[in-house]
Amino acid sequence: MSDILQVRGLTKRFGGLAAVSEVDFSVREGGIAGLIGPNGAGKTTIFNLITGVYKVTAGAVTFEGKDITDTEPYKIADIGITRTFQNIRLFKNLTVFDNVLTACHASAGYGLFDSLVRTPRFRREEKVLRDKSIELLSILGLADRKDAIANGLPYGLQRRLEITRALALDPRLLLLDEPAAGMNPDETEQLMRLIADIRDRFKLSVLVIEHHMDLVMRLCEHIVVLNFGQKLADGTPDAIRGDKCVIEAYLGGGDE
Amino acid sequence: MSSYIEGIIMLSGINLIAVLGLSLLTGFAGLFSFGHAGFMAIGAYSAAICTTILKLPFAVGIAAGGATAAGASWLIGRATLKLKGDYFCIATLGFGEAIRLILDNFQGLGGARGWPGIPPSTTIWNILILDVIGVALLANLVRSRHGRNMIAVREEELAAQVAGIDVFKYKMLALVVSAAYAGVAGSLLAHYMTFIQPKMFSMVKSTELTIIVIFGGLGSISGSVLGAVVLTFLPELLRAVDKWRLVVYGLAVIGIMIGRPRGLMGGFELTPASLRRHFADRKEAKAAKAAQVAEDAELGKDGL
């Protein structure tokens, strides 16, 4: 299988500080890759660079063979990449259903005039969007909460809703930024199964930032380790587990 | 109907159109503007030029008023919509005042003395018809993907972007539509008053529109309608207290904002469906309470 995402020599400097420097890695099509590293290692910065939230200082990002470096964030979704955020960013005052329905917008093509006078095209396409939203909510187990206000959901479900909203855009690559943050072991276990499930059902690739080592080691087929903005190691979970540099970065010191 | 009452109804109908536009921009797209009187002025003067100088029909004048205001807003939007929150607000304030000062100093259209002799073409019927059309179009817009995208921009800009929403485009759409509404309102006002003067479109007017939108409730069209009617009538009802009326008006607005911080109808729409739901909820709550009481009585009988 080929690589769906390739990152080459990716560098981001904020003034004199190199938040990310010369990072290379790739995500295989249909694979689940993990991005790990201590706090401040530059993981979220890499997500922001891939999705165009930050401008790249140097290097290139390639998606399905096309160069997408410095594409506007809103175009990234059209290209086929969506993400979630470390600190959940839902449309807080809207219902669960409306959160997903809003994200479905790209599946409809009706114009402003169709909206203003409610043409048959508008009605037809709106129905498709609504059905699609309901279907997604059922798959992700949120259907019974569809009329709840997003802000009032329990934390775990807010995370789940954010993933649902991302899926509404039919991505081929899903970027998850610490999806298990603040979850108990039980919820983490559920989440892990959910991510694997989503990958199989929606035929997409996943790149996940995570601190729960247990989750990363069991879920990911390929792991990239960052430290101080640089790539430390890159390989299968087993290779990473035995890597000297990684152990040193995470546990500090070595041979004492 | 006395012509006095009719006059107030017409004024509140005209205000309503401008308020509807501002409601889209502020309540749904989350952008505050303190320059909407500027768009009303552009609409008023353009419409007056069409009917008075060019002798075109009134309908053409209204259309021209809306279109020129929309065009002006597009230019302003290009220059200022990239600004974040408060800065955009200040830019609109400057725009509104600039328009007023330009008109003040442009003698060709009467300057500061004003422009009399505009035909009295506005009737209560064309106001009411435009009100209905205005509400219907706006309600359709906010319940479409375009409207939802504007709401998403208001709720969480970054998440909206990542969800593939072109934030700039939707802010611009909200601004242009809202300016078109203001332009139409200005055209109607000019042909109702038959006299226009730059002073009528000062910052006080812009602020009044914003107060009505917030008073009615952000993100609620029915709130805007209610707000426009109540706040246009209120100063008239208060004529009895003479020079204290603006003080009472101010106190009434403050009172509502303390009692209902989200405005009269914040986030809630008055539609047949929402009313039905409301009453169903109340019935359910009543039934639940009755069941609870029955259960308590039952338990009491068992000596618990």
Image (cartoon, rainbow, N blue to C red):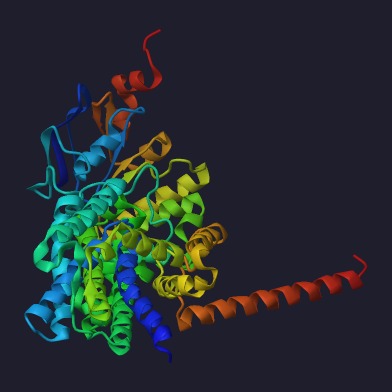
Q: Nearer the viewer, residue B31 or A73?
A: B31
Q: Nearer the viewer, residue B182 or A228?
A: B182
Q: Residue at x 24, y 72 (%)?
A: B186
Q: Is residue A201 visible?
A: no
Q: Is residue A30 left or right of residue A241?
A: left
Work out which quarter of the rendered image holds the C terminus of chain B and state it.
Answer: bottom right
Q: Residue at x 48, y 69 (%)?
A: B265
**Image position, residue A67 (x, y; %):** 8, 45
The image quarter in which residue B59 lies: bottom left
The outermost residue toward the top is A256
The outermost residue toward the right is B303
The outermost residue toward the left is B54
Q: Is residue B292 depicted above or below A1 in this figure?
A: below
**Image position, residue B280 (x, y; %):** 58, 80
Q: Is residue B75 left or right of residue B229?
A: left
**Image position, residue A84 (x, y; %):** 33, 48
**Image position, residue A159 (x, y; %):** 42, 51
